[in-house]
Amino acid sequence: MRGSIRLVIGLLIAAFSFLTYWCNREYNPVTGETQHVNMSADQEIALGLQAAPEMAQQYGGLHQDQQAAAKVKEIGQRIVQSTKARETPYQFDFHLLADESTINAFALPGGQVFITAGLLSRLKTEGQVAGVLGHEIGHVVARHSAEQIAKSRFTQGLTGAAAVATFDPQNPSSASAAAAAAMIGKLLDLKYGRDDELESDFLSVSFTAQAGYDPRAMIGVMEVLSEGGSRGGSEFFQTHPNPENRVARIEQAIAENFPNGLPRGLVQ
């Protein structure tokens, strides 16, 4: 009897999680997709602004080189003003972090974009910097953080339902089933992250070209990331696709966006 009650409760939790996730949908005019999100753009902006100081502190704060920091802001804003990103409600700002050993760039929801001095120092051209910032702008306008939060809540609800339905205090071995359900949920979240990275690569190809930069510079960025000690092993257990595998997708995106060839005069 207890098992039947647990099963019913588990099914109710799963149904509630599914309905909550499925009913929260919104059209994204930049990507042309209908997304499952459960927060407004204003909430994304507030969340990003709140998290920005703490995130910067984790990388040693902002870099003291005002000239380099200003150049990062200039390139980032050039991309924003040249693309559909300027039509979004997001408040874009670009920051150079002091960490000179870590190779990283990331965007918080709402438009706060960061690049470490460690990555910037390894980039050889302005076009490569634009490729990195365009990629991060892509994350923001595609609302990947909001999607991740919604998906995380959904998978947590489903794995929680599975745990309730399968765990029996009188049978300790049932804990392995609950642990397996939690692992499946985690792997689903990792897959979502890889898809987001590839979509941002695709958006960056378009954004950089619209801003006057050569999107082929992104291939050089992948080489930098690869040389910077990217993790090996199966992609399935990684949040990001291997840089080597992203090159083919970038080349495909360039071909799709510019079937007649890239415009002349793009900044490398």
Image (spheres, rainbow, N blue to C red):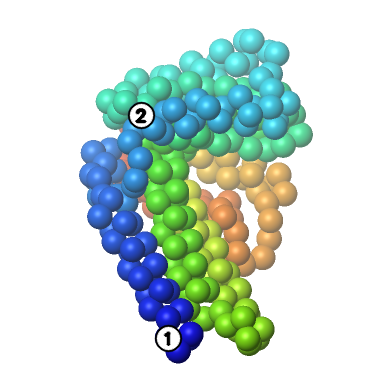
* Residue for badge 2: 42
Residue 27, how many percent across, how many down?
A: 23, 44
What's the mark number on residue 67?
A: none
Q: Residue furthest front?
A: 1
Vertical order, 193 against 69 (above or below):
below
47 vs 125, left or right, is left
- Crowdedness near tag 1: few (<14), some (14–19) or many (≥20) residues, C-alpha within 10 Å: few
Q: Residue furthest right?
A: 101
Q: Residue furthest top?
A: 66
Vertical order, 90 against 149 (above or below):
above
Name which quarter of the figure residue 124 lies in.
top right
How far, Cα to Cα, is label 2 from label 1?
43 Å
Instruction: Look at label 2 and name its amino acid.
Output: Asp
As helix, strand or loop, the secondary structure at mark 1 comes to: helix
* Residue for badge 1: 4
Vertical order, 267 against 193 (above or below):
above
Instruction: Look at label 1 and name its amino acid.
Output: Ser
